[in-house]
Image (cartoon, rainbow, N blue to C red):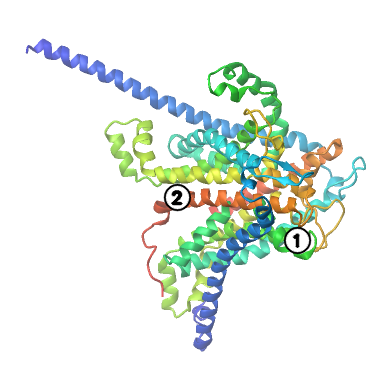
């Protein structure tokens, strides 16, 4: 084979590989472009939701709306009872759910590492984390509303607490696991019993993370509608009695947004703006807490 | 904190008791979670028992939901639940993959955090807001632009054409699936991004060293390495979509009829339960049928979520030092 033949061969080979390389680069760039487009679309959707809320909801923002209860259509009502009802039920849900979730997370991270029971608890808790919230509502309806003979604010709070538990479990366990065992060993070497090690050392070190979990849980349940439909039902008059039907922002929004009255629809959008602003602000605060830690 | 707070001298016996009590309390709370799940299943089943007894197996296949004649069946809502969930996945998975790939590999470091937070905020928006947004923003777009366009361009296609022939009302199965897709994108994307980050850098760097493009590394290294977790994340999204109530109720049209095309109105288990509940007397056959539907939804989501957790588990859960015994 002559030298020129080899040179031609190499040149052709080079051209081939260059063409192949170009095709591979083009494929890579095309996928990159599509992925950026998908991300842009997701951001655009978020922007669309937020602008819709602001454009339609801001017109109804007023002190009057915050200080007046819901009234019949056309009589200039507000959202006070819904806001207060939401605060009460979210507070009950958080107050009941947080200690249980904290202890379950502690059990998983400190007592049940690798045990069969611990794995089962973790598995079930993770399932509850994503279980349809409407079923929690049906469950509490059967468990509390039917035996008690009526819808009540406390039933709404209990339904929300069942949603709080698995969220707090997940963050508590994750955060406790991040704490180095040397900290625990140091505490034990000083003669501290295990429960004091957990409460005084582990909880303290994981406090920011646990707080984040609780805040995320608050943000999640504050916007829940479906479980409250079957438990606290909603109430168009002022009522803070825990054994009576209680209004909440999401349920009131649901009733108002689908109604045929302009002022109710307007209040529905204003309520939607309020609840979304509250939920997103809580989320952002939660993230700031964890970044500080 | 002083040593004495930790040690509490002179109370060794009491301390041992406290230690046991604390351990017991933690264990009881753990057991409580198991009992809770059992109680939810049991309560829904007991509540639905009269309906299961009265209708037998025909409850599952009957397409009726007729409060006047008191005939109830689960076929339409179950069909709607599964169809909207699967359609939502078809739309959401490619988009979620794009978002996850961008956040994990493509975006410059300074952009990852803000974009990541924005995507997570998308997941935090309450579902009723998605419903209102879907009804007032997406439904008009679907009815005026998207559905007529689909009918024009795909309506005559063989086999699938019939799916795109229908009155463009805007509400319906397709719109519900799209709103659900938007809702589950952030969940699936966040899971994918996290599992992509578990791929050892050495593997990817070796592939880059051989001259692979970034897409080839994703396709031939990252995706095969994380396959089971990626599927787990997708199933997690499906689990969310199946049980979603408020968003679907606003946009699906709420008709108890098997839709003949994608634009047709329908319902899902969750939307039917939410709408029919106020009309149903406590203890009536209608209420029992709703609880029976709830039981069916629980079984479906439990299976999907269980598969998801099992697939997500292996690599996510093992980290060194995890099994070190603590006295």
Instruction: Say above or below: A199 vs B100.
Output: below
Q: Are marks 1 and 2 on the same chain?
A: no
Callout 1 crowding tier (Cα within 10 Å): few <14, some 14–19, many ≥20: many
State the image coordinates of residue A196 (x, y, percent, origin top left): 52, 76
Q: Secondary structure at mark 1?
A: helix
Instruction: Say above or below: B172 vs A61.
Output: above
The quadrant where residue B262 appears: top right
Q: Secondary structure at mark 2?
A: helix
Instruction: Say above or below: B285 vs B118.
Output: below
Is any atom of residue A220 visible in this view?
Answer: no
Please give the name of the residue rendered at 72% of the width and 42% of the height, measured from the top-left corner.
Answer: B65
Task: Return the residue found at the far right.
Answer: A75
Task: Using the image as rendered, state which of residue B144 and residue A221 is in the foreground.
Answer: B144
Chain letter behind tag 1: A
Callout 2 crowding tier (Cα within 10 Å): few <14, some 14–19, many ≥20: many
State the image coordinates of residue A86 (x, y, percent, origin top left): 75, 54
Q: Which residue is mark 2?
A: B312
């Amino acid at each position: 084979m002559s030298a020129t033949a080899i040179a031609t061969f190499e040149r052709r080979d080079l051209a081939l590989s260059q063409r192949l390389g170009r095709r591979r680069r083009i494929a890579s760039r095309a996928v990159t472009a599509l992925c950026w487009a998908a991300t842009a679309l997701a951001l655009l959707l978020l922007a669309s939701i937020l602008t819709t809320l602001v454009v339609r909801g801001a017109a109804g923002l007023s002190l009057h709306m915050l200080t007046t209860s819901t009234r019949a259509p056309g009589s200039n009502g507000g959202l006070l009872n819904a806001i207060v009802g939401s605060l009460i039920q979210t507070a009950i849900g958080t107050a009941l759910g947080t200690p249980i979730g904290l202890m379950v997370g502690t059990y998983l991270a400190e007592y049940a590492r690798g045990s069969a029971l611990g794995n089962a608890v973790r598995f079930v808790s993770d399932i509850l984390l994503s279980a349809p919230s409407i079923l929690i509502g049906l469950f509490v309806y059967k468990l509390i509303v039917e035996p008690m003979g009526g819808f009540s604010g406390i039933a709404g709070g209990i339904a929300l607490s069942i949603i709080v538990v698995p969220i707090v479990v997940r963050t508590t366990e994750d955060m406790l696991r991040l704490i180095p065992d040397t900290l625990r060993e140091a505490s034990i070497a000083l003669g501290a019993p295990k429960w004091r090690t957990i409460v005084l050392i582990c909880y303290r070190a994981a406090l920011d993370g646990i707080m984040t979990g609780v805040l995320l849980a608050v943000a999640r349940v504050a916007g829940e509608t479906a479980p409250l439909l079957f438990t606290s039902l909603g109430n168009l008059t002022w009522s803070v009695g825990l054994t009576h039907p209680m209004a909440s922002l999401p349920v009131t929004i649901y009733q108002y947004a689908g109604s045929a009255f302009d002022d109710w629809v307007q209040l529905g959008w204003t309520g939607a703006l309020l609840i979304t602003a509250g939920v997103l602000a809580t989320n952002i605060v939660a993230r700031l807490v964890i970044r500080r830690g | 904190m002083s040593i004495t707070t930790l040690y509490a001298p002179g109370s060794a016996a009491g301390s041992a008791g406290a230690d046991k009590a604390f351990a017991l309390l933690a264990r009881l709370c753990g057991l409580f979670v198991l009992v809770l799940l059992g109680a939810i299943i049991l309560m829904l089943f007991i509540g639905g028992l009269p309906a299961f007894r009265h209708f037998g197996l025909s409850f599952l296949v009957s397409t009726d939901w007729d409060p006047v004649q008191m005939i109830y069946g689960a076929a339409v809502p179950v069909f709607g639940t599964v169809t909207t969930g699967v359609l939502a996945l078809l739309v959401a998975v490619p988009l979620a993959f794009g978002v996850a790939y961008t956040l994990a590999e493509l975006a410059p470091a300074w952009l990852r955090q803000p974009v990541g937070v924005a995507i997570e905020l998308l997941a935090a928006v309450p579902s009723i807001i998605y419903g209102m947004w879907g009804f007032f923003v997406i439904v008009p777009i679907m009815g005026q632009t998207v559905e007529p366009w689909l009918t024009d361009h795909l309506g005559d296609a063989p086999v699938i054409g019939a799916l795109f022939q229908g009155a463009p009302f805007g509400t319906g199965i397709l719109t519900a699936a799209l709103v659900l897709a938007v809702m589950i994108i952030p969940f699936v994307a966040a899971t994918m991004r996290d599992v992509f980050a578990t791929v050892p850098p050495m593997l990817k760097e070796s592939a880059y060293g051989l001259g692979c493009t970034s897409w080839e590394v994703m396709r031939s290294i990252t995706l095969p390495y994380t396959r089971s977790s990626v599927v787990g994340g997708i199933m997690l999204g499906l689990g969310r979509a199946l049980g979603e109530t408020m968003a679907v109720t606003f946009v699906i049209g709420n008709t108890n009829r098997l839709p003949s095309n994608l634009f047709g109105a329908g319902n899902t288990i969750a939307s039917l339960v939410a709408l029919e509940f106020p009309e149903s007397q406590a203890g009536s056959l209608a209420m029992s049928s709703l609880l029976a539907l709830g039981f069916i939804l629980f079984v479906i989501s439990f299976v999907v979520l269980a598969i998801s957790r099992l697939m997500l588990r292996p690599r996510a859960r093992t980290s060194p030092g995890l099994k070190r015994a603590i006295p």
